[in-house]
Amino acid sequence: MSIHLVGGGWRDAGDPEVYGRFIAEASVRAAGSSRMVPRIGVVVIAEEDADAGELRRRYRAALEAVAPCDPVVTVVAEGEQIASSVLSDIDALFVGGGLTPAYHHALEPLYDEVRLLVADGLPYLGFSAGAMIAAEHALIGGWQIDGIVVCPSDTAEDLEEVTVVSGLGLVDLAIDVHAAQWGTLSRLVAATQAGLVPGGVAIDEGTVLIVGDESLAVGGTGNVWQIVETDDGVAVATLGGGE
């Protein structure tokens, strides 16, 4: 089973290239519990004035459009935390998109339990914010480092300084999302250069990085931008959807 990190880019009609393998892995786990259709726990943090019912409908529809599954969508408001019951009797976990600090706050009390479940083979998919918090060193927002602008201010997630927290720890590299579309690649480059994170990947919209036990795969239409520290500073390389 794998960890699926999606760089954002919502499609109401679903996206088989991005979600297909995740649902297939959930189906394998469901078969072990004698379920014909996988039960996918979905966690969504609703921004102010968001329609919780509409969020449930959209997430269910996007997953059901890809393959047979039973998405169980839990929506909570920003500032609230998620009950551990969302992790009960599921075959996979999908953590959605929105304000990344709010997802960190909502799920932090469950991080240990999620880690144990994933270690036991539960497939995990993080979409945008859900991908960012999956890292051990989770970059959750900000647009300046020591007062110097490193990315557009409208990508800041309501934070001024680039902020790194202890995340889920499912992967040992930092994650940023909406890379080409929002210009966040520069934030991860700057955070690596400043020593805030030990390198990482920035993922384009419509693109998934799939992390297996000993393998990496990229699916979708965009690139995964890999940032590594070197003796001379920071190096950037890309992985495309067919590589």
Image (cartoon, rainbow, N blue to C red):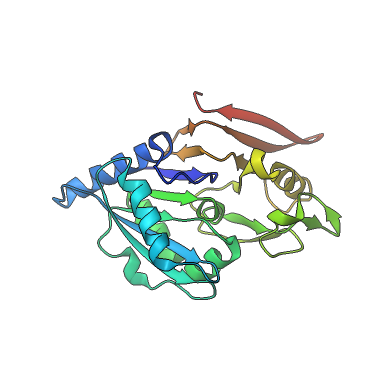
Residue 61 left/right relative to 180: left
Residue 67 left/right relative to 104: left
Percent across and percent down for residue 122 are 33, 51
Is 113 or 93 nearer to us in this picture? 93
**Residue at left offset 44%, top offset 64%:** 112
Percent across and percent down for residue 138 are 60, 56
For residue 17, say whether it is visible.
yes
**Residue at left offset 72%, top offset 54%:** 196
Q: Residue furthest left?
A: 34
Q: Which quadrant of the figure contains the N terminus?
A: top left
Q: Residue furthest bottom?
A: 80
For residue 199, say whether it is visible.
no
Q: Quadrant of residue 102?
A: bottom right
Residue 109 left/right relative to 116: right
**Residue at left offset 43%, top offset 49%:** 125
Is 197 or 145 nearer to us in this picture? 145
| Total numbered labels placed on residues in the image | 0
Q: Residue furthest right?
A: 147
Percent across and percent down for residue 40 are 31, 54
- Vertical relation: 210 (above or below) 142: above
**Residue at left offset 35%, top offset 47%:** 63
Residue 191 left/right relative to 211: right
Percent across and percent down for residue 173 are 59, 46
